[in-house]
Image: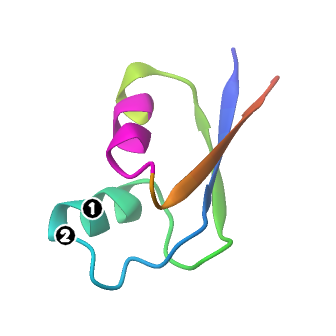
């Protein structure tokens, strides 16, 4: 199954509370931190919500 590498590229300072909560749920706290998640609809929805704060790469795994 494919995996996604999600990297935080912008700060959450000044962001809405629900965006900050989504970033924490993704496991991202600092700029340039990253997490690898399974590719599923839940993760895709979270990424879509904070797409202006993250970059995403697909990893074969």
Residue picked out by circle 1: 19
Whole-percent x and y of residue 38?
Answer: 58, 29
Instruction: Name the side, left or right, on which 56 lies relative to 46.
Output: right
Magenta highlight range = 44-51
Whole-percent x and y of residue 56?
Answer: 64, 43
Tell me what residue is drawn at x 38 percent, y 52 percent.
50
Tell me what residue is drawn at x 68 percent, y 29 percent.
3
Judged by its main secondary structure, the magenta piece is helix
Q: Is residue 13 above or below residue 5?
A: below
Instruction: Name the side, left or right, on which 14 lies relative to 60.
Output: left
Q: Quadrant of the N terminus?
A: top right
Q: Quadrant of the C terminus?
A: top right
Are the residues at dot 2 and dot 1 in contact (C-beta closer than 8 Å)?
A: yes
Mark 2 neighbour density, 10 Å: few (under 14) some (14–19) many (20 or more): few
User: Residue most toward the front?
Assistant: 52
User: Residue most toward the bottom?
Assistant: 13
Residue picked out by circle 2: 16
The kind of secondary structure element at disc 2 is loop
Instruction: Name the side, left or right, on which 32 lies relative to 40.
Output: right
The kind of secondary structure element at disc 1 is helix
User: Residue most toward the right?
Assistant: 60
Tell me what residue is drawn at x 35 percent, y 85 percent.
13
Residue 27 located within the stretch drawn in magenta: no
Spatial distance from mark 2 to mark 1, Cα to Cα? 5 Å
């Amino acid at each position: 199954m494919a995996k996604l590498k999600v990297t935080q590229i912008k700060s959450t300072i000044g962001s809405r509370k629900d965006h900050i909560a989504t970033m924490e749920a993704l496991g991202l706290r600092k700029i340039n931190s990253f997490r690898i998640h399974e590719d599923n609809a839940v993760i895709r929805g979270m990424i879509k919500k904070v797409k202006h704060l993250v970059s995403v790469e697909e990893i074969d795994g």
